[in-house]
Image (cartoon, helix red, strand yellow):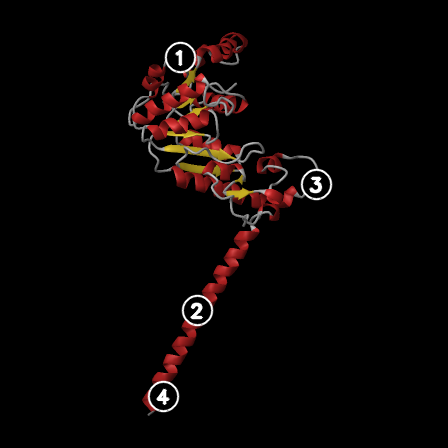
Amino acid sequence: MPGEHTEATVSTEATERTEASVSTEESEIDVAADQNGADQHPADQHPADPRPAPPGTAEQGEDAQFYSKGPLRLRGSQVPATTTDQNLLESRGSSNWVHEDPWRVMRIQAEFVEGFGSLAEVGPAVSIFGSARLGAGTQAYADAREIARRLAENGNAIITGGGPGIMEAGNLGATEAGGVSIGLGIELPFESGLNDHVELGVNFRYFFVRKTMFLKYSRGFVVMPGGFGTLDELFEAFTMVQTGKVTSFPIVLFGTRYWQGLVDWMASTLIEAGTISPGDLDLFTLTDDIDEVVATIGPAGTLPHAPAVGRGPEQ
C-alpha cells in the first residue's frame, strides 16, 4: 500500500538520523578525550604498574614500594629523576618551556579543582605541622597525638601533611577520637605515600596548591617542632595573618624550649630593625600546655582567640 511504503521510508530515515547522531557524539567524545590527554606533557603520562604487590604485604608496605606523583603511584623504571615542582622552577637549559608551560597551567588548575572538591565539605578543621623525623617514642610525637585527639574531640577535623613523624601522630590522634583525619601529601623524592592513619588523602604535585588548601580549609595552625617545611608553613601563616589575608586565625607554637630562640630573634633583631611591628608578636601563642592549645583553638563552630585583622603590610 502507498501509505505503508511512506511510513517505512520515514521510519528508515529517522533510524539513520539517530544512528548518525550517536556516531557523531561518540566521535566528539573520542576527540575530547584525545585532547585531554594532549594537555599533559608526554613525560607525565606513565602507565600504571601492572605487577601485583607481594602476598601478605600491608598497606603501608605497598605505599613504600611506590613513588607518589600527584594521583599516580609509580615504581621501577617509571620513577622520574625530577619532581614536577623542580621542572616548573628550572631556569637552565632549553627554552622549550615556552611551549610547555601553557599546558602545565591546566594541570595546576586541575589540582586546585581536586583539592577544593575534596575538602569543601570536611567542616571546621585544624592543621598540625611538624617534623617527619620525630617519630613514635619522642615527646613531640606523643604531644602531637594528644593535641590532635583533644582537638578532634572538640569537633575539629585534623589536617596534616600526611607523612610520617608529627604528621602521623596528628592523624593517629584524630582517628583515636573518632574525628576526621586528613592528609595532604606532596610529591617528594625521599617520601612515598600517606601514613596509615589518613582517612581522606589528597596528593599534590605543587607546593603552592597544597599550601592554599592548608590555609583555606583550616581555622588555625598548631606548629610542633620541625624543620624547613614546618618553618615554611609557619611564616606563610604569619604573612597571611599580618597582611589580613586570613582573619581570626590562631597560630600556636608548641614547645617553648624549641621555639623560644626564634621568638627571641624576632623580638630583638626584627623589631629592632623595624622590619616588623611589636604587635606582630601577638599573632601567635607560644606554650607547653596542651590545655592552652585546645582553649586557643576552641571547639568547632566558635570564633578562635586570635587577632581579627592584620596589623600592617608585609616588610
Using a 10 Å C-alpha cutoff, classify the residue at mark 2 as few (fewer than 14 neighbours), some (14 to 19) or many (20 or more): few
Mark earlier in primary sequence (3, 1): 3
Q: CA distance from mark 1 to mark 4?
A: 91 Å
Tell me which numbered mark, 2 or 4, is placed earlier along the sequence: 4
Q: Amino acid at mark 1?
A: Asp
Dot 3 falls on a residue whose secondary structure is loop
Amino acid at the residue labelled 3: Ser
Frontmost residue, 294 versus 48: 48
Task: Residue at 42%, 74% (x, y): give it.
Answer: 17
Q: Which mark is residue 19?
A: none
Residue of label 3: 94
Q: Assess whether mark 1 and mark 3 are in contact (beta carbons under 8 angstroms).
A: no
Mark closer to the chain start, 3 or 4: 4
Relative side of 308 to 62, left or right: left
Residue 47: give x, y in percent of width and height.
56, 50
Marks 1 and 4 in Cβ contact (< 8 Å): no
User: For the residue carrying disc 4, how many other residues have a C-alpha within 10 Å: few (<14), some (14-19), or many (20+)?
Assistant: few
Q: Residues within 10 Å of mark 1 (few under 14, many from 20)?
A: few
Q: CA distance from mark 3 to mark 4?
A: 69 Å
Residue type at mark 2 is: Ser
Which residue bears the numbered disc 2?
A: 21
Residue at the limit of the structure toward the right, as seen here: 93
Measure the C-alpha gap from mark 2 to mark 1. 69 Å
Marks 2 and 4 in Cβ contact (< 8 Å): no
Q: Quadrant of residue 89?
A: top right
Which residue is rendered at x = 40% and y = 12% of the image?
288
